[in-house]
Amino acid sequence: MLQVLCLWFCFNLQLDYTQPIQKEVPKDTAVADGDSQIGTVGCVAVDNEGNLATATSTGGIVNKMVGRIGDTPIIGAGTYANHLCAISATGRGEAIIRGTIARDVAAVMEFKGLSLKEAAAYVIDQVPRGNAGLVAVSSTGEVAMPFNTTGMFRACATEDGYSEIAIWDSPTK
């Protein structure tokens, strides 16, 4: 039996939001309501043999500088998978790159012997508040979705019917 766990998220930092610069729009043209439709979309997956995979795509930040490297899901920083876990990160790219947070989760698991949830929480705590979140899965199917921002859209589902969808912190925390 193949068991695949996929998690996805679309992330929108609600701190320091800058309204897009408006161009003059002809009156007969529809105008966006200002609700940003950009953000990160990431997925992590594990199969019944413990094989792991991750994918990350980012829409970037509104009014970003052209060529801004922070809007790139760099391997090891924003996206990473090895034999222990798969991670997809989101948030302010510069903080994620400086902390190489995706690779650090795997390293903390490997070298400190922590569980996925403990390692992911530890790494997110090292990133300045309001800058990052991630979704992760281990080769055994453990799931972690920590963040240090106001909220993070996230979800997970398993073949056996378990599902979780959330934006804000869990009331159990």
Image: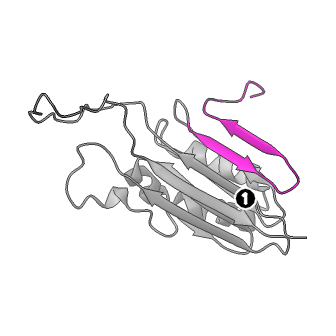
Would you say 140 lies left or right of 18 here?
right
Q: How many labels, in total?
A: 1
Q: Position of residue 140 (x, y in %)?
A: 84, 64
Q: Nearer the viewer, residue 127 or 73?
A: 73
Residue 149 visible, this orientation: yes
For the view shown, which residue lies furthest in the front direction?
A: 28
| Residue bearing the label numbered 1 | 137
Callout 1: few (<14), some (14-19), or many (20+) C-alpha neighbours within 10 Å? many
Q: Is residue 61 magenta?
A: no
Relative to 117, residue 53 above or below: below
Relative to 115, residue 24 above or below: above
Q: Nearer the viewer, residue 111 or 52?
A: 52
Q: Quadrant of the C terminus?
A: top right
Give the residues in magenta.
Answer: 152-173
Tell me the residue at 49%/36% (across/down). 129
Q: Quadrant of residue 168?
A: top right
Residue 111 visible, this orientation: no
Relative to 159, residue 167 above or below: above
